[in-house]
Image: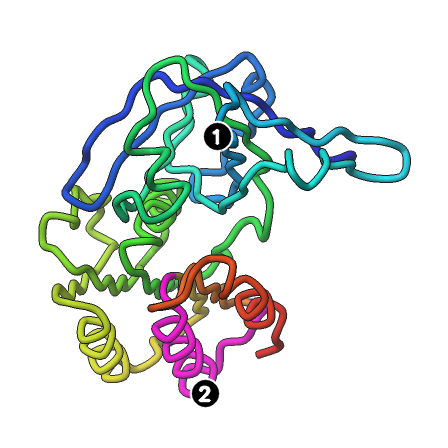
Amino acid sequence: MAPTPPRILKVVERQRLSTNMLRIRFTGDSLADFPTDHNGAHIKLLFPLPGQDEPQLPVFTPSGIQWPSMDLKPIARTYSVRQFDAERQLLDVDFVDHGDTGPASSWARACKPGDRIGLAGPGGRWPMLSDTEHAILVADLSALPALYGILEAKPERPHAKVFVALESEEDRLTPPTSANIEWHWFVGPYPGAFRQLQSELEGHLRPSGSVCGWVAGERDLVLAARDFLTQQWQLSKANLYAVPYWRLAETEEDFHQARHDIMDAEY
């Protein structure tokens, strides 16, 4: 199947969910063929450059994707589908509010209805959780939108243990409700909350029956949880999704290659 070309979407509204989280709702006729079952999946957002009303998108040619010249190539950042309403063609994407220190956060803080952005995807591994009796999931604030989307898409899973590290109690938002989900919350400054989560995680024994895992967020949190789940629970890449979204004290550009090296590693 040929890849779907990137789309131009328009902002419908911006909503403040918490001190550190914003939700941007998008729409556009190009969402008519957007998949309806990919809540939590990765997407690439393509941001307009200063002075542009919308980003210049690549074109698909027989020889592959052709991007604009480097001085016109949009800034790209990876986000997750929080939820998609196919009937109304509305797509929600949640942004961690880093202030005006990065291109994505500064755009999200300032955007208004009618502003335009590019979107590519969804892509990446799907489904992220295997069809198993049990699931274990680990996340920080950056991975919370994907986590909530994934859990809401699979409410009938027999049992899931979920471990989340946040810097603010306010960022807990309203989690998916299910008697089958066992929540473990760790609130405090990073990386201290990561260490608390890891200590609690390592006290849990693998349940009997089939198990899958999903781990996303800060690099050190992801690697520690991945190593525990592969070494102690004997999970592998076939049933464990483990992807770092960011690293403390590093920019997106500085961490880009290391992130892909971790994603491509065998475990």
**Tag 2: residue type?**
Gln
Rendered location of residue 207, percent (x, y) = 34, 75
For marks 2 and 1, give the CA distance.
47 Å
Rendered location of residue 228, percent (x, y) = 39, 83
**Tag 1: residue type?**
Pro
221 is within the stretch colored magenta: yes
Q: Residue at x 48, y 63 (%)?
A: 243
Which tag is nearer the camera, tag 2 or tag 1?
1
Question: Magenta segment, which residues?
Answer: 217-238
Q: For mark 1, what is the residue? A: 50
Residue 168's place in the image compared with 71, above or below, is below
Mark 2 or mark 1, which has the lower sequence index? 1
Q: For mark 2, what is the residue? A: 231
226 is within the stretch colored magenta: yes
Rendered location of residue 101, percent (x, y) = 32, 49
SS at circle 1: loop
Q: Residues within 10 Å of mark 2 (few under 14, many from 20)?
A: few
Residue 52's place in the image compared with 256, above or below, is above
Location of the N terminus by quadrant is top right
